[in-house]
Structures are given as structure tokens and as C-alpha cells.
Amino acid sequence: MSGVAGRRTIAGAIRHESFLRAVPDGVTLAVRAQPGARKTAIMGVYGEGDAAQLKIQVHAPPIEGRANAALIEFLAEMFSLPRKSVELASGESSRSKVFLLRGASAAEVKSKTDERIAG
């Protein structure tokens, strides 16, 4: 990992905002999941440019949707949203996923991810 302006990144120096996009219903968040980890936590940014994803280690195994459910719970808590407002938009059986955060603003999501990445 290398550091950029106090943020942890993976695969070189990139702008972390590229993994989130404002949409009419809220914000989409591109995630690279690493299931079966010791704990659920943000590890940094995976990839570059438009392909960048927020890398999240997930404690749950990738069996019967448990890792997806754990990611939804983690993101809902992180962004102070009800679980029903966090929807897996794509990537149900892939490590690369896109979540829709209904009702969230891009500024809020950026601020909270900044805190976690820098932390």
C-alpha cells in the first residue's frame, strides 16, 4: 500500500472518489469484497480511475449470501442508513459489487469514507 494525502490506497495513487457516484436515488458505491477475513473493515481502495473500488474485508464467508448480508449491515451502520436503504445492485456472486445507498448524499458518503480510509 502507498499513502496519498493521508489516505491508504492499493495499486498506486488514485483519487478515491471514483468508487462512488451520485445517482437520482442516492449514491452507488463500487466495492471489492474480501470475504472470510478476521474482521469486517475498510482496507483502502482497489484499482485505479473509473475501475476503482472501495476494498472491504468481510468477516462472513461467501456462502449462501452471508458475506453480502454482512456488507449490507456494515454499510448501513457506517452511513447511518436503515438496512433496507442499502441494496446490492450488482455482483451478487462476485468479489466486485455495486451497492445503492438510497437517500444518501455523495458528500456524506465521501466524508465518511475519507474518515475510514485515513483512519
Image: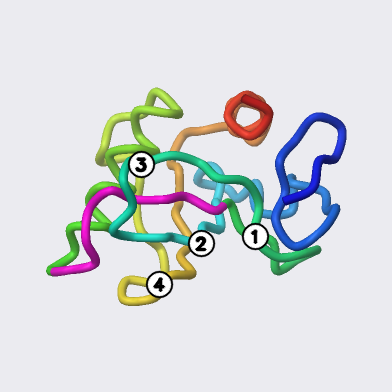
Q: Residue at x 41, y 60 (%)?
A: 34
Label 3 – label 4 distance at C-alpha: 18 Å
Q: Amino acid at mark 4?
A: Gly
Instruction: Categorize mark 3 by other alpha carbons within 10 Å: few (<14), some (14-19), many (20+).
Output: some
Label 2 – label 1 distance at C-alpha: 7 Å
Q: Amino acid at mark 3?
A: Thr
Q: Is residue 43 left or right of residue 76?
A: right
Q: Are marks 2 and 1 in contact (CB under 8 Å)?
A: yes
The nearer-to-camera label among 1 and 4 is: 1
User: Disc 2 designates what residue?
Assistant: 32
The nearer-to-camera label among 2 and 4 is: 2
User: Disc 3 designates what residue?
Assistant: 40
Residue 106 among those drawn in magenta: no
Q: Considering only order in the chain, which callout, 4 or 2, is on the residue closer to the N terminus?
A: 2
Q: Which residues are magenta?
A: 55-63
User: Disc 1 designates what residue?
Assistant: 46
The nearer-to-camera label among 3 and 4 is: 3
Q: Residue at x 55, y 51 (%)?
A: 29
Q: Considering only order in the chain, which callout, 1 or 3, is on the residue closer to the N terminus?
A: 3
Identify the image quadrant of the C terminus: top right
